[in-house]
């Protein structure tokens, strides 16, 4: 895999808006917070754009500026401003040769799952599923989240064991051991890429899934789509993150837990539940594209390869 360098104090983080817009107040606060960590910040123009109400610029603008950040020798790492919607619109406009030739640590989650997937498969770039500038850093991360993010950003060694906060238990759904590169992210984005040139390849990999504000029947539909596409047949193991605001609106019916029991557990791939990664109060950084091992029986996930050099 291509890898960006571990960041040091004084390095420059490029802020990009690949999806939805944020307010000027949120942007200013996120810049101040990143600078308090010791980084310089370079802001792309679309971080202050709004197009159609829910996009931070046209697809062409957003793709141009993301390409430019990878090509810019002054930029040491790239962080997304926020998720929302829009990243899939720019996948066909990105210069994957340039990205592969100028590897940089790239950070984001949620809608950014589309970019993680494309970068991993089209540019062989290891990336970081983790907190973003305006949606997380500007809002104030808890200590557990901040610790994992700064470790992943600044240390050129494997992240090691992913350990939940003391009040959150990782649960085994299917016993067993598996190993492979970690892939995945937001379930809705993985489902949206099915049948496209950017469909997630899970062969021999550990598949990570999370989402927010989806009712169980919608999660059922998306998991069924992944199942019909062979993603659960192909993967080596499954890591289930957080499911924020995904309770059923009616008291009767399946919960998210039930849906995973019905659709995922029958594949009998080593599977763990409730790893605190996703849209919850705790969102631990998770390297994508690098080797990891999963001991579902012991509820242990270990990142064995660094995401940076």
Image: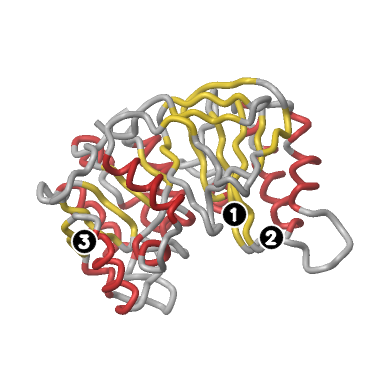
Q: Earlier in the sequence, mark 3 or mark 1?
A: 3
Report how far apart the C-alphas of labels 1 and 2 lie in the structure. 8 Å
Q: What residue do we see at 26% from left, 65% from top? A: 61
Classify mark 1: helix, strand or loop.
Answer: strand
Q: Quadrant of residue 133?
A: bottom left
Q: What residue do we see at 52% from left, 38% from top? A: 163
Instruction: Give how far across and how far down residue 215 sits, in percent.
Output: 72, 61
- Front position in the image: 3 or 302: 302
Mark nearest the camera among 3 and 1 is 3
Residue 7: mark? none
Read off the residue under disc 3: 35
Please identify the residue farthest to the front as the structure is shown: 166
Q: Is mark 1 in CB contact (under 8 Å) with mark 2?
A: yes
Instruction: Give how far across and how far down residue 294 sits, in percent.
Output: 57, 26
Q: Is mark 3 in CB contact (under 8 Å) with mark 1?
A: no
Read off the residue under disc 1: 211
């Amino acid at each position: 895999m291509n890898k960006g360098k571990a960041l040091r104090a004084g390095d420059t983080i490029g802020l990009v808006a690949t999806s939805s817009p944020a307010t000027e107040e949120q942007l200013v606060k996120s810049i101040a917070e990143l600078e308090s960590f010791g980084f310089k910040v370079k802001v792309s123009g679309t971080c202050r754009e709004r197009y159609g109400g829910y996009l931070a610029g046209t697809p062409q603008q957003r793709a141009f500026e993301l390409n430019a950040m990878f090509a810019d020798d002054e930029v040491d790492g790239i962080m997304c401003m926020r998720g929302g919607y829009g990243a899939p619109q720019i996948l066909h406009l990105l210069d994957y040769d340039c990205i592969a030739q100028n590897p940089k640590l790239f950070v984001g989650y949620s809608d950014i799952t589309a970019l993680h997937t494309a970068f991993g498969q089209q540019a062989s770039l290891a990336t970081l599923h983790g907190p973003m500038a305006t949606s997380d850093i500007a809002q104030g991360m808890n200590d557990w989240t901040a610790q994992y993010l700064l470790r992943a950003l600044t240390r050129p060694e494997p992240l090691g064991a992913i350990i939940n906060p003391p009040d959150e238990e990782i649960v085994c759904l299917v016993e067993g051991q598996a190993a492979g590169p970690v892939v995945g992210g937001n379930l809705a984005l993985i489902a949206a890429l099915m049948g496209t040139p950017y469909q997630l390849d899970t062969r021999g990999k550990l598949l990570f899934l999370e989402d927010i504000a989806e009712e169980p029947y919608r999660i059922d539909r998306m998991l069924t789509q992944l199942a019909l596409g062979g993603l659960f047949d192909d993967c080596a193991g499954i890591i289930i993150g957080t499911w924020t605001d995904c309770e059923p609106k009616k008291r009767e019916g399946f919960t998210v837990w039930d849906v995973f029991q019905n659709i995922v557990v029958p594949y009998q791939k080593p599977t763990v539940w409730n790893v605190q990664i996703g849209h919850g109060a705790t969102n631990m950084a998770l390297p994508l594209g690098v080797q990891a091992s999963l001991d579902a029986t012991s509820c242990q996930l270990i990142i064995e390869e660094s995401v940076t050099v």
